[in-house]
Image (spheres, helix red, strand yellow):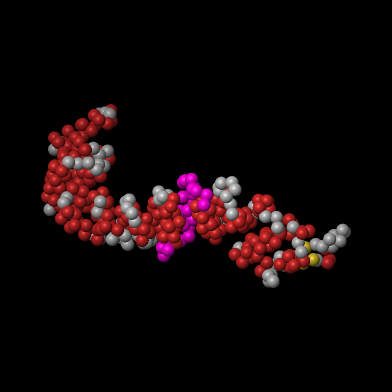
Amino acid sequence: MLGELDHEELETVLIERLSNEQDPEVLLQALVAIEVRPTMTALHPVRRLLQDDVVRDQAARTLLAILQSTDTMSGLDRAAIARGAREAMLSSSGSSIAAILVLTGNDKDLDGLATLLDSDDPDTRVAIAKSLLQRGRRTVLIEHAEDELLYPFALQAASINGNDTIAKVLELAPPTETLREQWMDTVMALAVRAPSNRILELDELVGATPHATDILRTRMLSGIIADRELEADLHQRILKRLIPMLLEQDAAASALTHIRGLPEGVMDDDLKALQFISAIRARLYDDASSMQGDPAMWILAYQDTVASRPESATDLRSEIARRFHDALTPEQRAQLGLVDDPLMQPEDGSPTDTAAPVDAETTP
């Protein structure tokens, strides 16, 4: 029959059962149903069941779910629930009852219950942390950031808006690698909300953070570029920081995409050079050729590749030899490690290139 009722009718029936039912099994089923779909209209019927020894623990879980679902409650309701929770704690050590008192109690209650953040029971630590966060007790949560179980709550506490919010979050070194992604996501979420005139400052803050890496900086700056329209000068300054880091991370295609996002006509010589090396690193040689047709610049790119990405150097050397064969001077051919093979002369008498191994080359 209950399955045929709509939500409001079912809610009415459940609350009536809580007020009048004597069978513990029926009460437990009603409490579980309200825990799944908490409603403030069940607040006091559930509160009264905190004094029932048989259903107390489930009543506490249900009441906690109701309290967590709302931020508005009268002072009288709050005081009544706190009294009930204090009485229930005399007979039960359940974490839900303690969490209820955190949400409804006075400062003395909160100061005492905050010590449960050091409990040996993981469920208790989490329940208390969640309630302390809802009550706005941020400092004590931040002080427990070294506990990997409580770290997410400390991160949320530090993320609440303030003048130095991102600095506080940056200070919270993730206690495990598993939590590093969550920390990075939080920093990025705060950074994309920052005003444009603080972007470079925030990048410097991240760069000065010992437990941060350039991966966080590139994600943050990339996210900011994608999120908003930037003045041309600021856009260029960001790219001059971002592109070299992307190249170090073997993300040349991404670097090239970012540079192409600049408005037409605002690219200076430094960015043109970064665009060219990005195309080279991405092995987009036709694109690179449209940016730079001087073989000397390609040879410089080759020498950089030998030093930084030797596994890619042979491919680039072959491309230079193919693309600039007739334009290369003897000195440039030597820089590339290209030698003429006298036994493989074509009929027209032009030289045929033989390349020395890249790791055997010496650059004059």
Where, by quadrant of the figure, is residue 207 drawn? bottom left
Whether 20 is among the magenta residues is no
Q: Which residues are magenta?
A: 208-233
* Residue 237 shows in the view: yes
Give the quadrant of residue 79.
Answer: top left
Which residue is at 22% across, 57% downward?
A: 114
Examine the rendering and report whether any part of residue 24 can be seen.
no
> Residue 140: x and y, percent?
25, 58
Residue 49 percent coordinates (x, y): 15, 42
Residue closer to the observer: 49 or 269: 269
Q: For the point 26% across and 57% down, which residue is it?
A: 139
Q: Which residue is found at the position 25% from the left and 39% from the top?
A: 38
Residue 226 is a magenta residue: yes
Is residue 78 found left or right of 300 in the rendered image? left
User: Looking at the image, which is closer to me, 191 or 105?
Assistant: 191
Magenta: main secondary structure equals helix
Q: In the rendered view, does 226 fall on the left or right side of 150?
A: right
